[in-house]
Image: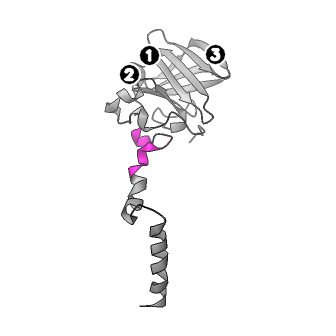
Amino acid sequence: MSKFASALIPLALLAACGSKESAEQQVAAPEQTAGLGKEPYPAQMPTPSADGVDTVDYSGSYTLTGVDGSQSTLTLDKDAGTYEYVSPEGTTSGKYERLDAGRIAITDLDGSAGYFSIASGALYRLAGKSSPFDEIDPGRLYRSSDYGAHAEQGEVEPSATSTESPSGKAK
């Protein structure tokens, strides 16, 4: 046996002693836990619709939980075309504007305009007015209270992902 191979055997044994899992289990672990992180992966998130403003019943409340645990809630009334936004900075309300079949605009969310696309059980705050309706960012996902009830859209149950969101950085 070569000196190199002889030196690797004790290292391999030492590594195996430090863990109760086999090497096979250790390799498989990242795949098994992929959907259990603090934020949903894009494949697990509801898909915004190009005609969501017209076809999705989005009346209701949607919550975004920041990395610091603070919450902002956006409540929309589709029939009346109104919103109420409650955040740690205060509350605003009024009428929202339809930009096109897939996006809406709210003029005052904590002092700036907010642009949203609509998915079944969720709203996505877009990076800007010219952002496409299908821009998906877990950090800007507002979830409805029945978010997990929309399995046809491909997302996971809320219990499989935390309600915490990342920093909300734009793409």
Q: Which mark is residue 59?
A: 1
Amino acid type indicated by mark 2: Val
Q: Position of residue 168 (x, y in %)?
A: 59, 37
Q: Which residue is mark 2?
A: 56
Q: Is residue 38 magenta?
A: yes
For the C terminus, the quadrant is top right
Residue positioned 42% across, 38% down in the render = 160
Badge count? 3
Left or right: 90, with 23 as reference point: right
Q: Nearer the viewer, mark 2 or mark 1?
A: 1
Observer-nearest residue: 171 or 26? 26
Query: Which residue corresponds to the image point at 59% horizontal and 13% vertical from the top-left?
Result: 93
- Mark 3: which amino acid? Thr
**CB-based contact (under 8 Å), mark 3 and mark 1:** no
Query: Residue at (62%, 15%) from the top-left corner?
Result: 92
Q: Position of residue 4 (x, y in %)?
A: 48, 86
Q: Which mark is residue 91?
A: 3
